[in-house]
Amino acid sequence: MKLSKTYEPQKIEPKISRLWEKGGFFKGKIIKGKKPFVITLPPPNVTGNLHAGHAMYVVEDIMVRQKRMQGVPTLWLPGFDHASIAVEYLVSKQLKKEGKTKQEIGRAKFLKRAKQFAKTSRKGIKNQLEKLGFSLDWAKEAYTMDNVRDKAVKTAFKRLYDKGLIYQGEYIVNWCPGCKTAISDLENEHKEESGQLFYMKYGPFVLATTRPETKFGDTAVAVHPQDKRYLQWIGKEFTYESLIGPRKMRVVADEAVDPKFGTGAVKVTPGHDPIDFEIGKRHNLTVINVIDKNGRMTEATGRFAGLKVLEARNLVVEELKARGDIVKIENIIHAVGHCQRCNAIVEPLISKQWFIKTKPLAKKAFEAVKTGKIKIVPKHFEKTYFHWLRHIKDWCISRQLWWGHKIPLKGVEDTLDTWFSSGLWPISTLGWPEKTADFNYFYPTTVRETGYDILFFWVAREIMMCIEMTGKSPFETVYLHGLVRDEQGRKFSKTAGIGFDPLEMTFKYGTDALRMALIFGNAAGVDLKIGEDKIKAMRNFANKVWNAARFIMMNREFKSQKSKVKIKNQKDKTKSNKNDGWILKELDKTIKKTNLLMANYRYGQAAELVYHFFWHKFCDKYIESTKDRREQAQPILMKVLATSLKLLHPFMPFITEEIYQKLPLKDKKKSICVEKWPQ
């Protein structure tokens, strides 16, 4: 069988995908007596197209393709997240274009729209995942809002509630005035912006603040307990004339105060700052809410009531200036929280919400990593993990949204935080709370592979929730990849025109080129800088593989149209030419080093190693040395080519499959993906 003159991935990849689908090679099978290798796909949000971060699923595909070739029962289970706040925002945006609001159409019609939106997105994303060559078992596809996952959510909630670990209380939360809901820390995206630091007279003090409009909610001044400048004031009270009348304040000492910030004395606003809220709890301070859930000033601000936050800030500063209470103003750059979805400035507000008491869960999750039951790669992220769990706060799990899992309590209209259902992902995908055959065989899973940025937001919660529900750690290893950035180190952003669409790159250069570019030279936990030039370079490598295979197969035709090659022993291969023995030794070294690197999760270095062996040692040196002894070298050429294709397959599955299908090998499998991995 001949290879065409040029490699055309756009024509070949759909054909190879059909071969894999028809062959059922990716089905996770239960084989008693054999320990399986299991990954549950980090579920992409049903919000549209995949982005460059999702393309890093290639790391998982490399893992499962190698294990499959090693004869290990392998399951890579796909699924999707309903993404409550993101879908709600996008559907509301659609309605706005139609001149409607969700309140106008009502909950039932809104949920119908959201369900259809999610269904359409799921279908599109599934198609994109298949195009990227990911060897997922689609027969086991899961979705956080389907019946099985819904039962898991209700069961987990009831267990936590019955144990007294779920409660309702008033605490400070991240509040989005645009989406009108509490949001998680991950959804509160901090952006650096130009701002001002206002130094203002405050009774006997001068205080520095970026938010003078919140001064109406101040109930104390705080200083560091060892700050000699203010020791005489600690525990005392003073009265100052505010813009809406006299206010009595007391001075408290607290270690949360940074004596180097501003003047070292800070105003404490327990209702509108997370740190101030904690200071307030420690010192029993009164809480005054001065900003409402619409981002406007409350009645507690007197004549400023009803103004938007920025309007109130400007007016407060003008009046303080007029009174001579502004000492100075510094221009600064500071981080301001924005809603990841609607970009509204996030307000820390006191709100009645539902919470999980996390300390009992965190203790078990802490021990799982401390005792080595779970290994984190790279290891240095264990320090971050331990730090977060030591300082963990109760988890706000309620959201003021319609789309999502409704909290299963009578009279409660709120939905659950999306991370609640995704925290159950390793067990819910396998049928829990039912003890299904899949759950009994495939759980605990083997690896959780994801970006380091959600180690706490998701991975730690998976560990907490799954240990609490099953008594077992959900996976053995946490592998953290870095974030995908452009060549200048900037985070990919479609709106800012930074980066690229991974599917556009696959259409232009082929999926294998993109996959290889994403993994080549990359290391766990390190951000990846990638641009079109690197993908183009890997397209050139794919062409090199193709042309080498084509030369070798043409070589075979030169020797005999019908011969089939089988190497019997190395002695026969090394008699005639020293280069034959050399390339076989180099191949053997490459196999051993590749296996060692992959066993230690160094996939980027393994890709580099095989790349350089194939291009520089096999093609540039050995193949060149055989051009005047084509027939004699053919067995070695075929041996090295076939083995190299196996080593390359997890990284470049399409081109290796296409060439493999046309190789004249005895005892050939139906697909290279179930061939025996080189040892």
Image (cartoon, rainbow, N blue to C red):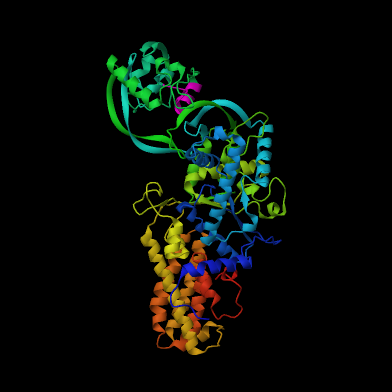
Of 406 and 423, the residue lying toward us: 406
The residue nearer to you, when weighing 630 against 80, is: 80
Image coordinates for residue 390, horizontal then vertical, percent: 52, 36
Q: Is residue 486 above or below residue 278?
A: below
* Residue appearing at x 41%, y 75% in the figure: 617
Work out whether residue 468 or residue 326 is closer to the camera in this orientation and state it: 326
Q: Residue at x 45, y 63 (%)?
A: 507
Q: Quadrant of residue 396?
A: top right
Of residues 557 and 122, the one nearer the viewer is 122
Residue 504 shows in this picture: yes
Q: Horizontal placement of 602 versus 215: left or right?
A: right
> Against 72, is 578 above or below?
below
Q: Is residue 211 visible?
A: no
Residue 599, image x and y in percent? 53, 61
Residue 280 covered by magenta stretch: yes
Q: How many numbered marks does the figure carry?
A: 0
In reply to whether residue 285 is colored magenta, the answer given is no
Residue range in magenta is 268-281
541 versus 524 height, above or below:
below
Query: For residue 82, which quarter of the picture?
Result: top right
Residue at left 49%, top 66%? 652
Instruction: Locate residue 148, reporting x and y percent.
Output: 68, 46
Does residue 111 lie above or below 553 as drawn?
A: above
In this view, the residue farthest toward the front is: 99
Tell me the residue at 53%/62% (across/down). Answer: 133
Quadrant location of the C terminus in the rendered image: bottom right
Residue 610 place in picture, x, y as percent: 45, 68
